[in-house]
Image: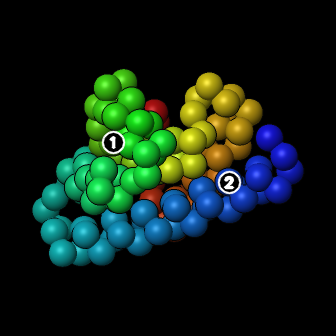
Amino acid sequence: MGFFKRIGKRGAARTLAKSAHEAFIKYKKDNPDLPEAEIAEELFKQRCSPGNLNKAEKVRFNKYLEEQGKADSLFKLCLAMIYILLDVSEADVKEYEIVRKVIEEELVRSGHEIPSV
């Protein structure tokens, strides 16, 4: 992967994590009794609904549902979204670890506690 493409994916991952955290906080404010898992699932449905995805993203979305089933934390939601939207998976070991760390850092900076995955 080229230098600029790697930098772009890191920036996109940071933006994605920040946006997901903001949506999570808003949803939690409106639904204070809902646990993180339910909020993450709802945000997953909203952000990754097939109507919002292009053809390649729909393929990755369906594959994610078959293999993972759900995104039951904000962190897992972000990881699902980088796979579906940015096409970064665990198979891309180096890039995945870098992007995963970027997401973790952004969520922690935002005040979100990361569960052990």
Q: Residues within 10 Å of mark 2 (few under 14, many from 20)?
A: some
Q: Is residue 67 above or below residue 82?
A: above
In the figure, is residue 50 to the left or right of 20? left
| Of callouts 1 and 2, the N-terminal one | 2
Does the rendering let one see residue 75? no
- What residue is pinned by disc 1? 71
Q: Quadrant of residue 67?
A: top left
x 16%, y 58%: residue: 34
Inspect the image, locate mark 2, and give the three-letter code of the amino acid beneath it. Lys
* Residue 75: % across, % down: 45, 48
* Residue 87: % across, % down: 57, 42
Q: Please, which residue is most extreme toward the front here?
A: 55
Identify the disc placed on residue 97.
none
The reply to whether the C-beta atoms of the residues labelled 1 and 2 are less than 8 Å apart is no
- What residue is pinned by disc 2? 9
x 20%, y 51%: residue: 38
**Camera-side residue: 10 or 32?**
10
Q: Is residue 22 above or below residue 97?
A: below
Give the structural element (helix, strand or loop) at label 2.
helix
Give the structural element (helix, strand or loop) at label 1.
loop
Q: Quadrant of the C terminus?
A: top left
